[in-house]
């Protein structure tokens, strides 16, 4: 694939360096951070990279191309928003790498026909992955245990007006029984074991994807499929997620 020069593009955080626009367009600008550039070209580059890395589900690539990741990071990190890197989001937590978000959601969709039904996300963080999920699922329930991040996600997501995303403040280790059973469960934090509540709340035919500590003491992506006969577990590649913690704070 031909490498285009100037990637990653440096976003300007200064409204004054916006390319010239008609007054009408300027007035219509709703970007609270005053980002002047159209970020969609940079996002498309990110999607091309994801595809080159082997991600291929069109629904996932489309969702990754649609969600403006730069709206979820601090203004000082906006220039790195479309690089394949995790970034701090406050309170010691991080927004996952685009590649990892796409990979996990692709795993959730594997074998599914069309969009997923109800999805449970553990670890809302800044709300980015919940926004991506909203494009591939009919309903997204996302739980965060840190009040500060729950509120940050709420404010980040307000701009997107995603009617199918439900943000919950609580301990995700308990799942969210009111929304169960889930077609898919995804965790952005890794524990020693998979909480029983997640398994209980997974629909028959549903899939769970979560980082979990394995026998060698390292974290790996765990995929659990619930069939009519029970649960089938597979251990995939090594990953590095923040720890799954119990309780709220
Ligand atoms: N998906 C997020 C990634 C956030 S990092 C994003 O796109 O930004 C993982 C998050 O999991 C952290 O915010 C952490 O506070 C949260 N977390 C850890 N244990 C949790 C638990 N038991 N319940 C809910 N959230 C939890």
Image (tube, rainbow, N blue to C red):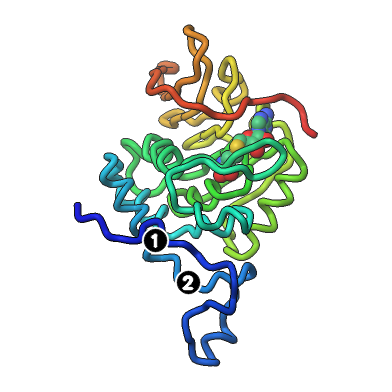
Residue 96: % across, % down: 52, 40
Which mark, by number, is residue 37? Answer: 2
In this view, which residue lies farthest toward the bottom?
23
Are the residues flagged by discs 1 and 2 in contact, CB closer than 8 Å?
yes
Which residue is at the front of the view, 61 or 137?
61
Which mark, by number, is residue 42? Answer: 1
* Mark 1 element type: helix
Question: How many neighbours does mark 1 have within 10 angstroms: few (below 14), some (14-19), or many (20 or more)?
Answer: many
In this view, which residue lies farthest toward the left?
1
Which residue is at the front of the view, 119 or 121?
121
Left or right side of 109 for 23: right
In this rendering, is residue 229 above or below 14? Answer: above
* Mark 2 element type: loop
Quadrant of the picture in which ligand 1 is shown: top right
Which mark, by number, is residue 81? Answer: none
- What's the residue at 34%, 53% (across, down)? 47
């Amino acid at each position: 694939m031909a490498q285009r020069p100037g990637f990653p593009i440096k976003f300007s955080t200064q409204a004054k360096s916006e390319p010239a626009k008609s007054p009408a367009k300027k007035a219509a600008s709703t970007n609270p951070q005053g980002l002047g550039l159209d970020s969609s070209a940079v996002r498309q580059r990110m999607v091309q990279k994801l595809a080159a890395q082997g991600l291929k589900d069109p629904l996932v690539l489309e969702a990754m191309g649609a969600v403006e990741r730069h709206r979820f990071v601090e203004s000082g990190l906006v220039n790195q928003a479309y690089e394949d890197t995790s970034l701090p989001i406050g309170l010691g937590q991080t927004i996952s790498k685009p590649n990892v978000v796409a990979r996990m959601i692709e795993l959730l969709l594997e074998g599914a026909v069309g969009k997923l039904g109800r999805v449970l996300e553990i670890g809302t963080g800044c709300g980015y992955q919940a926004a991506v999920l909203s494009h591939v699922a009919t309903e997204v329930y996302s739980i965060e245990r840190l009040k500060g991040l729950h509120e940050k996600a709420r404010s980040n997501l307000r701009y997107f007006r995603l009617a199918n995303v439900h943000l919950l403040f609580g301990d995700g280790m308990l799942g969210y029984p009111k929304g169960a059973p889930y077609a898919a469960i995804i965790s952005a934090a890794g524990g020693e074991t998979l909480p029983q509540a997640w398994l209980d709340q997974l629909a028959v035919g549903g899939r769970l994807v979560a980082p979990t500590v394995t026998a060698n003491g390292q974290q790996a992506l765990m995929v659990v499929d619930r069939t009519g006969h029970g649960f089938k577990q597979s251990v995939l590649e090594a990953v590095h997620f923040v720890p799954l913690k119990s309780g709220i704070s």
